[in-house]
Image (tube, helix red, strand yellow):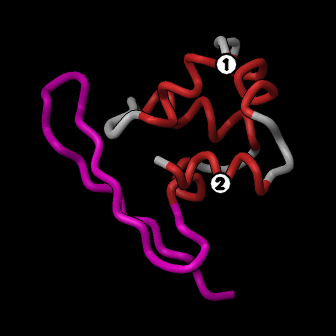
Amino acid sequence: MQIIKKKIQQRGMTLAEVAAKMNVAPPTLTSIIKSDNPKFKSLQGIADAIGITVSELLMDDDCTTHTTIVCPECGAKIQIEAKKQSE
């Protein structure tokens, strides 16, 4: 999910800084970012570490972003749609 790496860079932070705020090793954060299906808890941790919401984390600045995650409890696919709000 390259959008996550982009958001971290936009906030002026490094992966190491975000990993430290999440209390995980940098390789763990890299694995989360490279995952096609990161856990919501991991996304929430990244968002909290950089000071934004999960929706903002997944939203492409140029357009609507659709992301699908899998519920760890039941295995259901959950589609997340983030739209940039007009000001």
- Find residue 62 and report its horizontal and vertical position in percent: 57, 79
Disc 1 crowd rating (10 Å Cα; few below 14, some 14-19, many 20+) is: some
Q: Going by the image, does 27 lie left or right of 23?
A: left
User: Which secondary structure, mark 1?
Assistant: helix
Which residue sits at x=48%, y=29%?
32
Q: Amino acid at mark 1?
A: Pro
Residue 81, position in %: x, y? Answer: 37, 64
**Residue 58, which numbered label?**
none
Query: Could you tell me residue 10's position as x and y percent?
Result: 77, 57
Label ID, residue 6: 2
Query: What whole-number distance in Å separates the C-alpha atoms at marks 1 and 2?
Result: 16 Å
Q: Secondary structure at mark 2?
A: helix
Q: Earlier in the sequence, mark 1 or mark 2?
A: 2
Let me know if residue 6 is in the magenta part.
no
Residue at image position (45%, 66%) is 82
Furthest residue in direction right, as rendered = 12
Q: Amino acid at mark 2?
A: Lys
Q: In this figure, what is the number of numbered marks? A: 2
Q: Residues within 10 Å of mark 2 (few under 14, many from 20)?
A: few
Residue drawn at the location 54% of the way across and 68% of the way down: 60
Q: What residue would you read off at disc 1?
A: 26
Give 33 or 67, whichever is nearer the viewer.
Answer: 33
Question: Which residue is pictured at 50% across the width and 55% down the height?
Answer: 58
Q: Are marks 1 and 2 in contact (CB under 8 Å)?
A: no
Say whether residue 84 is magenta. yes
Q: Is residue 48 left or right of residue 80?
A: right
- Part of the protein shown in magenta: 59-87
